[in-house]
């Protein structure tokens, strides 16, 4: 089955799809809500690369200058060429993909973009995102990993996350968008080539994803944003029945000391307002917005995510873990995704 899935994905994204317009969902969304610097960077990416973009979210977090970035399932290279500009000449971007046709587009655009940007800092590797070791990627070699609507296509999603954690540096993060379902997708849909190619058949039930991420070593997955996906009317929608699909963006930090729950140590942080494009408020995730100049009580995990990552220079930190005050009020077990039809802010 593994070979069938991989061959089907290569066929669908290499030959069946010719552009984002061929998708049967609204996974590819408007650029209107993108941050200004991302819109400007995207405008410099050539048309052939952008035409073969099949992502479902915005996988460009803040504070990127000088970072070494890995894009899992980089496709035609659209996100890589955006990231190239944002990490700058001191940074590096590596794309990994297994589809020859997509890699050919990405590779063929390197010289054009190096000339347009004034520097060349992008490379592409043919490889399987489930086996990054076989692609020659070393332990603790990347500051940031991104992925845009690709992990659902992998047969062994836990292997993808474990490999991602292996190649991340301590304090690094995986920031990615993907498709999820509000329940487990039945076998007949999971084995359907069209459903799988459209990122629906391989979509994880959201609660299974949370458990999988924790098993892979990412103790506290943080949901950044989400939106429902519309599936074109017709046989595909009819077969999907009552299953709802969502595009969601998560950030997973590789940090020693993260706990399974939100524990209260009386710690606080104050945002300095210094992140580019976020002078008033910085959103760590969908539940944590930090107002510039205001001290905010946070749980121990949030404190660590800010203090031990590249975000640290933008915050002041108060307190330690000497005294434990119990648990922070936690979210319930209901589905975390937004069911509003309008696209969430930051969607691409």
Image (cartoon, rainbow, N blue to C red):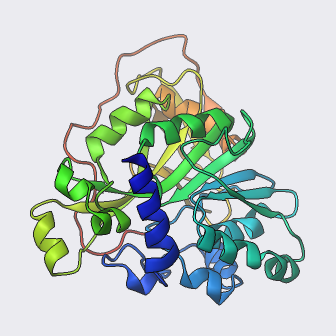
Q: Position of residue 274 (x, y in %)?
A: 69, 56
- Corner quadrant of residue 131: top right
Residue at horizontal 28 percent and vertical 65 percent from the top: 195
- Corner quadrant of residue 329: top left
**Residue found farthest to the bottom:** 47
Q: Is residue 65 visible to us here?
A: no
Residue at horizontal 29 percent and vertical 39 percent from the top: 208
Q: Is residue 201 above or below residue 303?
A: below
Residue at horizontal 63 percent and vertical 89 percent from the top: 47
- Corner quadrant of residue 189: bottom left
Query: Left or right: where does residue 73 sit relative to residue 212?
Result: right
Q: Is residue 216 visible to us here?
A: yes
Q: Position of residue 103 (x, y in %)?
A: 66, 69
Q: Nearer the viewer, residue 193 or 344?
A: 193
**Residue found farthest to the top:** 322
Residue at horizontal 88 percent and vertical 81 percent from the top: 115
Q: Position of residue 312 (x, y in %)?
A: 68, 40
Q: Nearer the viewer, residue 83 or 281?
A: 83
Query: Left or right: where does residue 339 sit relative to residue 212?
Result: left
Q: Nearer the viewer, residue 173 or 160?
A: 160
Q: Nearer the viewer, residue 337 or 203?
A: 203
Q: Position of residue 171 (x, y in %)?
A: 66, 35
User: How many numbered badges does the structure rendering display?
Assistant: 0
């Amino acid at each position: 089955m593994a070979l069938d899935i991989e061959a089907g994905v290569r066929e669908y994204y290499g030959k069946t799809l010719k552009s984002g317009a061929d998708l049967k969902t609204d996974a590819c969304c408007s650029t209107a809500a993108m941050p200004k610097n991302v819109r400007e960077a995207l405008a410099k990416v050539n048309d052939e690369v952008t035409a073969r973009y099949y992502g479902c979210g915005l996988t460009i977090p803040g504070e990127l200058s000088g970072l070494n970035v890995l894009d899992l399932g980089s496709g035609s290279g659209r996100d890589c060429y955006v990231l190239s500009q944002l990490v700058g000449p001191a940074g590096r971007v590596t794309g990994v993909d297994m589809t020859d046709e997509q890699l050919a587009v990405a590779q063929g655009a390197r010289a054009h973009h190096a000339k347009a940007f004034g520097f060349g800092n992008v490379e592409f590797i043919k490889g399987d995102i489930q086996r990054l070791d076989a692609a020659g990627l070393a332990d603790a070699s990347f500051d940031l990993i991104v992925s845009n609507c690709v992990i659902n296509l992998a047969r062994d999603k836990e292997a993808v996350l474990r490999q991602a954690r292996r190649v991340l540096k301590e304090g690094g993060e995986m920031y990615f968008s993907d498709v999820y379902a509000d329940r487990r997708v039945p076998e007949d849909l999971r084995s359907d080539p069209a459903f799988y190619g459209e990122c629906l058949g391989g979509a994880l039930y959201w609660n299974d994803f949370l458990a999988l991420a924790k098993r892979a070593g990412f103790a506290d997955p943080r949901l950044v944003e989400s939106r429902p996906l519309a599936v074109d009317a017709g046989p595909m929608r009819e077969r999907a029945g009552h299953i709802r699909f969502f595009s969601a963006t998560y950030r997973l930090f590789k940090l020693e000391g993260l706990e399974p729950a939100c524990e209260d140590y009386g710690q606080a942080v104050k945002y300095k307002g210094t992140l580019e494009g976020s002078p008033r408020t910085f959103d760590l995730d969908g539940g944590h917005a930090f107002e510039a100049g205001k001290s905010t009580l946070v749980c121990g995990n949030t404190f660590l995510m800010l203090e031990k990552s590249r975000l640290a220079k933008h915050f002041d930190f108060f307190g330690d873990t000497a005294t434990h005050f119990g648990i922070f009020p936690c979210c319930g077990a209901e589905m975390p995704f937004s069911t509003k039809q309008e696209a969430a802010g930051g969607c691409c």
